[in-house]
Amino acid sequence: MVSSVATEPDRQSEGRAEPLVRIDGLSVDFATPRGAIHALRDITLDVPRGKVLGLVGESGCGKSTLAYSLIGLLAENARIAGGRIDMDGQNLAQLRPREWRALRGRRISMIFQDPMTSLNPVTTIGRQMMDIQYREKGGRAEKRARAIEFLEQVQLPDAASKLDAYPHQLSGGMRQRVCIAMALLTRPDLLIADEPTTALDATLEMQIVALLRELQEKFGCSVLFVSHHLGTVAELCDEVAVMYAGEVVERGDVAQVFRDPCHPYTQALFECDPARIREATRRLPTIPGTLPDLRRPPKGCAFRARCPKAFERCETEHPPLYDAGGGQAARCHLNDPAEDRA
Ligand SMILES: Nc1ncnc2c1ncn2[C@@H]1O[C@H](COP(=O)(O)OP(=O)(O)OP(=O)(O)O)[C@@H](O)[C@H]1O
């Protein structure tokens, strides 16, 4: 384990380039008939400029809620209960629907798990790519040329002919390429990709990940990449944030976190990663236990009931994000320099 040098770094960006987005103390609740679900709790995280940030964690830990908060697409029953999302002097957490419409699809765009979520099944690809440019300058011919150019950027074969195709006439991989082209068409500063390769087979997944990396470098945008696949995150991302029960429990440089995870939850996630398990086994290991009830998050550490390393302090004291050095931080008392247990 990396030795701790200080406690509670306010931000991981200190001493580094100004991030594109600063999320500060963000909390999001969902109203339900059985009480509010505290889906995000006091999230403080930077989206670095011109880099790829991966968001990992098991199902239900709040990854999509965080992603949707950054593009103003939270469900109707969601409420931002506190905190800020700062991007270029604007607090996105307070934007009105009209202001979101001006930003979404232009400065911030998103690709979804299922390409059909964003593609209209009864309209041609060309029409959809023209519509997306309705605010852009230029005439029809220019916009059509730009649409073809972007379809070529995502390496769609015979791009011009695809303008007349309907989404169902393309394969799943091609549809996801079209979605990436549409998301990048307006040259956004931030591209959010919510499990964009989950519906694809392994070969296509690798191709799409390589394409995303290439385009991110070409366009210089920031990417928030939400994924269950640790291998994909290691391949694509520069930084990673690990979420558990609505909190960021570890964050840092992707190579550093994968080499030396500081939080027992991150360690357990890696131990359960099929790609890391070499010996022949009939059953994949899982982390014993379940996520806590987010209507009543536990008082101390949210992971303590499942943590093999938990001790008394974890029961009563909520851990802050302890600095683990080199920009890495973990929400676990074992990383407290004052704690003599490592
Ligand atoms: N509209 C909603 N109403 C009530 N609860 C919700 C709503 N959307 C999400 N939740 C709850 O909020 C928590 C976080 O969900 P979220 O979808 O963000 O997790 P996730 O990590 O993205 O999971 P997955 O990987 O399965 O998509 C979960 O407990 C989920 O059940």
Image (cartoon, rainbow, N blue to C red):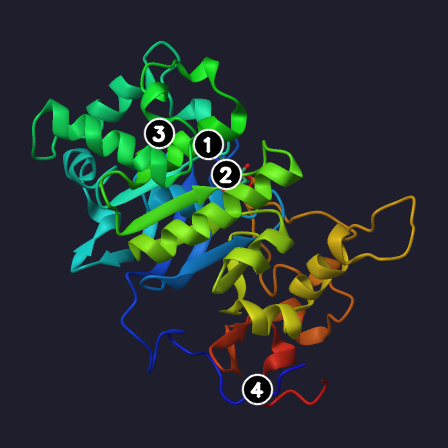
Identified by mark 4, the residue type is Ser
Residue 33 to residue 71: above or below:
above
Above or below, comparing residue 114 to residue 310 in the picture: above
- Report which residue position mark 2 lands on: 196
- Residue, disc 3: 76
Decide which of tag 2 and tag 1 comes sooner along the chain: 1
Position of residue 204 measured from the top left corner of the image (x, y, whole percent):
58, 37
- Real-space Cα separation, disc 3 to disc 1, in angstroms: 27 Å
Q: Earlier in the sequence, mark 3 or mark 1?
A: 3
Q: Earlier in the sequence, mark 4 or mark 1?
A: 4
Residues under numbered marks 2 and 1 in contact, where contact means CB atoms less than 8 Å apart: yes
Q: Nearer the viewer, mark 4 or mark 1?
A: 1
Residue at x 36%, y 9% (from the top left corner): 122
Disc 3 vs disc 1: which is toward the camera? Answer: 1
Q: Quadrant of residue 125?
A: top left
Q: Work out whether mark 4 precedes mark 2 in sequence or the reverse, and give the earlier one.
A: 4
Q: Secondary structure at mark 3?
A: loop
- Report the disc number at residue 176: 1
For the view shown, which residue lies furthest in the front direction? 158
Mark 4 → mark 2, Cα distance in angstroms: 35 Å
The quarter of the picture where the N terminus appears is bottom right
Q: Where is residue 176 shown, x and y percent of the image? A: 46, 32
| Residue beneath disc 4 | 4
Amino acid, disc 1: Gln
Q: Residue at x 18, y 38 (%)?
A: 96
Identity of the residue drawn at 45% across and 22% down: 116
Circle number at residue 332: none
The residue positioned 27% from the left and 36% from the top of the image is: 149
Q: Nearer the viewer, residue 95 or 164?
A: 164
